[in-house]
Amino acid sequence: MKALKICFLTIIFLISLSKPTKIQANNIFGLHLTQTNDIANSAKIINSSGGDWGWVTIVINLQHLDHQHWQNFFDQCRSYHLIPLVRLATRSQNSGWSRPSYQDVDNLANFLNSLNWPTQTQHIILFNEVNRASEWGNLINPPHYADVAIYASQKFKQLNPNFYIIGAGLDLSAPNQPPQFMSAGRFYYQIFHYKKQFFDHIDAIASHAYPNPAFIGLPSQTGQHSIHSYQWELNYLKQLGINKDFPVFITETGWPHLQGQQNNPNFYDVNRSVEFLISAYQQWSQHPQVQAVTPFIFNYPYPPFDHFSWLDKNEKLYPAYQKIINLPKTANHPPQKTSFEFVHHYLPFIIFPNQKYLGKIKLRNTGQSIWGASETNFCLPPQSTTNLQLSPLCTNYQQVLPNQNHIFRFTFQIKDNPHHLDSFISWPQIPAIQITTATKKPTILRVKTGLKQKIIQFVKNLHLHIL
């Protein structure tokens, strides 16, 4: 009878999915990755059908703090327009994770601060399902988690105020059975009564909104064990007395499918699992506090997560997920830091008035944005003296990546100046280049470099050294 009821509800539900609607809010689409080299393939799904700057959840642990590896990942996120949600982890221990020390937090924070992130806001998730003993050194300890989280928030924000701190996603289906499990409500309750200020130190919460029980709930169901479990979390925190409207990042969710290394008849067929996920996306997109949804998991076609994997054992996308690709999406527009350093300029040795000249200037991209076609339109307006015509410095079709140098070409022309006043070539944030008179009859100009004074000072120093 129970199976018949579920089947009936499912049929009604599938009828309502005949025309998927476009996601109207910001682009919440994303994926949960297990390995950084999946970035290119996942980007094709996340930013498909009009989407841009979607999300990826990725775990970083203390055993793999390789600067080149992670900078390469962030550079790929930049190129593919993906916003990383970086979840902190420690060291593997007895099929779980060791409990972090303050030194561990320092190491993670200093390392992540050393990287050039793809966006100005740098999202950090403070560990994972900490109401399970295996995730916290085999001992659930809400006060200790609160202390570590507060310390981590302060540490990250002292290093860079652009770090955005997200509380750990809890196991919302965990029973209150210590020492192995603690219910999510009990965990929040103990933190609140230990240090209420914990909630002042996080900017958002992560939520693991699975369709429980047993991952086979329907998208229409609500409550703590549903895909709307984040609403239960928000309401529960309000009941405790937390008057803060937290943004929500659903970093784990999804329906496992029948297909895997061995079929599991307890799960839905992959086609139905995908239809359910589409319905869930449509519902999540209507909730303004939901910022991102990264279903678990993109590529893990082996036990224990083969039934959650979007790719099969041959690393091919299950065809049913094409419906997710086809679903119309929108674009995010995350702020990026755009900055540069002046390196050198190239100008003619002598300059005659009323003649147009070509100059060059080399700048280094020291920011987060890519300059050029389809990216940031980098253009500096001229700020020269009135007797000088100067063109702007603008990128063209060529892309300039962070840490790359680029030579800009510009034109300039100096009007004849009977008073022989100095002229200046300049753009915002670039040292002014002074053009001074070399001879008055005829008028010949030159770039003032200070070379003469440097030679005189060098000779004086050499003479003193000999004496």
Image (cartoon, rainbow, N blue to C red):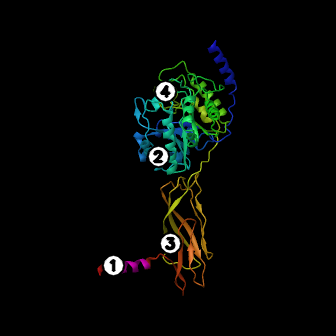
Q: For the residue marked with disc 4, what is the amino acid? A: Asp
Residue 90 is left or right of residue 245, and the answer is left
Q: Nearer the viewer, residue 205 or 386?
A: 205
The crowding category of the residue bearing disc 1, from other C-alpha atoms within 10 Å (few below 14, some 14 to 19, many at least 20), is few
- How much space separates mark 2 and mark 4, taking CA atoms? 32 Å
What quarter of the picture does the C terminus occupy? bottom left
Q: Earlier in the sequence, mark 2 or mark 3?
A: 2
114 on left or right of 419: left
The residue shown at (51%, 46%) is 154
Element on which disc 3 rests: loop
The residue mark sitting in front, 2 or 3, is 2
Q: Secondary structure at mark 4?
A: loop
Q: Nearer the viewer, mark 2 or mark 4?
A: 2
Return the disc, 3 or 1, that comes first in the chain's sequence. Answer: 3
Q: Residue at x 61, y 78 (%)?
A: 415
State which mark lies toward you, 3 or 4.
Answer: 4
Q: Residues under labels 3 and 1: Cα distance? A: 30 Å
Residue 8 in view here: yes
Q: Residues within 10 Å of mark 3 (few under 14, many from 20)?
A: some
- Range of residues picked out in magenta: 453-463
Nearest to the eye among marks 4 and 1: give it. Answer: 1
- Residue found farthest to the front: 193
Viewer-proximal residue among 129 and 376: 129
Q: Please tell me the numbered disc located at residue 109.
A: 2
Residue 454 % position (x, y): 42, 77
Badge 4 is on which residue? 306
